[in-house]
Image (tube, helix red, strand yellow):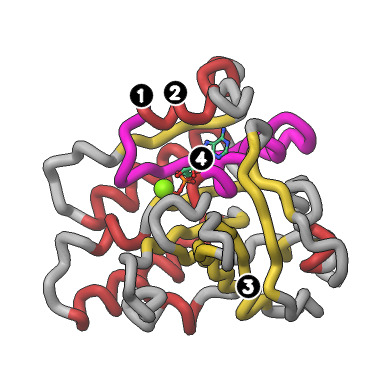
Amino acid sequence: MLPRVPTYIPGFDELIEDGFSQESIILFAGNPGSGKSIFAAQFLYEGATRESENGVYVSFSETRVSLLRNLLRFGWDYERLEAERLIKILDLSTTKELGIQNNLNRILETIKDVDANRLVIDSITALTLPLEKPADVRFLIHLLYRFLKQVGCTTIMISDIPWGSQKIGSSVEEFIVDGLILMLTDYDEDGDLKRTMRILKMRTTNHSKKTIAYEITDDGIQINEKRK
Ligand SMILES: Nc1ncnc2c1ncn2[C@@H]1O[C@H](COP(=O)(O)OP(=O)(O)O)[C@@H](O)[C@H]1O
Ligand SMILES: [Mg+2]
């Protein structure tokens, strides 16, 4: 069997045969505030602190300062991990250049720099934003996929779904990625916010087919669903 890459997110790994398969690319799609960035940051934090698997967080939407502040709230001291060279944040939120190749080069350099095994791209939506033609978006996503398969990291790719939209992405990424997880926010009959995720696709994995309830607490993401 292929080696698995545990997330150590409480309750999550048992839903996917103990972790993502090594070097797979998993797309997390969801509405704003559904916890995509928190999930991804937790995945890197746990990898770096428990497994000595170094990580790179590529941020296109949030600045490094804002990300550091938000993550510290969960007790994840990314600044310390950066000093220890276990993690590196690549802040591409303010890059003026729209050069995709330039961005890919910087991602590659950063991965090499900390010898990363785990990678987060937050988000593919922001990365492809400057592209107007659907054909260019498709081209970039194929390029990115080939690029990611070469770098040998287990990757979480994030896709932002605007409120009210039924579309997960630009309808290319969901086909080419190895896994697809949908993170949904809804309101229950009492009018309270309810968070659920669905694993729509996970290659080489007998994954949970349930609608999985989860919470965001002061410790990060936590799965509430006990059954597989
Ligand atoms: N300490 C906390 N306790 C509970 N919920 C929190 C906490 N911190 C953040 N959240 C929730 O997480 C959401 C942000 O999650 P985030 O991962 O940034 O979302 P996105 O999917 O947009 O990346 C906030 O809107 C809030 O609902
Ligand atoms: Mg986010």
| Residue underneath mark 1 | 65
Q: Are marks 3 and 4 in contact (CB under 8 Å)?
A: no
Q: Is residue 43 visible?
A: no
Q: CA distance from mark 3 to mark 2?
A: 29 Å
Q: CA distance from mark 3 to mark 4?
A: 25 Å
Whether the residue carrying mark 1 lies under 8 Å from ligand 1 is answered with no
| Residue underneath mark 3 | 198
Q: Is residue 202 left or right of residue 61?
A: right
Mark in front: 3 vs 4: 3
Quadrant (top left, top right, bottom left, bottom right) of the N terminus: bottom right
Of 149 and 175, which appears nearest the observer?
175
Q: Amino acid at mark 1?
A: Val
Q: CA distance from mark 1 to mark 3?
A: 31 Å
Mark 2 Cα shell of 10 Å, populated few (<14), some (14-19), many (≥20): some
Which portion, as a residue range, is magenta?
38-64
| Residue underneath mark 4 | 56
Mark 3 Cα shell of 10 Å, populated few (<14), some (14-19), many (≥20): some
Q: Amino acid at mark 4?
A: Val
Q: CA distance from mark 1 to mark 2?
A: 6 Å
| Residue underneath mark 2 | 69
Q: Of callouts 3 and 2, which one flags the residue occurring earlier in the amino acid sequence?
A: 2
Q: Position of residue 48 (x, y in %)?
A: 68, 33
